[in-house]
Image (spheres, rainbow, N blue to C red):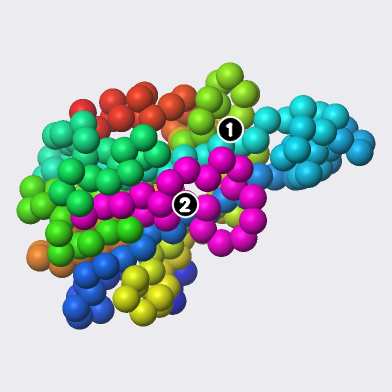
Amino acid sequence: MINLQKGQKIDLTKSNPGLKNIMVGLGWDPVENAKGGGGGGLLGGLFGGGNKQANIDCDASVYLLNANSKLANPKNLVYFGNLTSPCGSIRHSGDNLTGAGDGDDEQINVDLSRVPADVHRLVFVVNIYECEKRKQHFGMIRNAFIRIVNSTNGQELCRFNLSEGYEGKTSLITGEVYRHNGEWKFAALGESTTDPGLKSLTRRFL
């Protein structure tokens, strides 16, 4: 398994002949809130303790972009409201509302052999649901990562830990799986924006 730094790229199919099915796992944990006495901390935040901190609901999504890095079809955005791409090559595991617990919080399965020829980039993003209403941002999140797993044998091919500070940021463009000379590669992006939701973030790809 390879740990990537921001900006690094890695071959997927060239280094793993026959690779067709990958699982893209995205994970994060809420930062523990130490304020509020008995009602504070992680448990207070999750179960409505004295500080009344709402859950931080992060949502993972993937854009299927064409050669011009544009979203040609609105249904080529796979997210909690559209769990499968029109071509059937992308399947989302569904929404995780809290980010609590170890391991992946949301998973997106990709059948590389079925991705349409006019799709050149799969861009994976995470945003905070109702971030403005709840006054939440990625400075309240820790241990964020994106990882690529060979679905056939469970081998983790690479991982990118998004470790830099994202104070005040509300959307993360975590990484992308893209075509290059007939092969698939992965790039660790780690870009952050202040887009308040998926609708705003999507405008960047239109």
Q: Residue furthest right?
A: 37
Q: Which residues are magenta?
A: 89-108
Disc 2: which residue? 106
**Badge 1: few (under 14), some or many (20 or more) residues near its Cα, within 10 Å?**
many
Whether residue 81 is visible to the viewer of this picture, yes or no, is yes
Q: Residue at x 36, y 79 (%)?
A: 153
Q: Secondary structure at mark 1?
A: loop
Along the horizontal axis of the image, is 162 left or right of 35? left
Q: Is residue 54 above or below residue 38?
A: above
Q: Residue at x 80, y 38 (%)?
A: 44
Spatial CA span between label 2 and label 1: 18 Å
Q: Residue at x 56, y 62 (%)?
A: 103
Amino acid type assigned to the residue bearing label 2 in the image: Glu
Q: Secondary structure at mark 2?
A: strand
Along the horizontal axis of the image, is 35 left or right of 54? right
Disc 1: which residue? 137
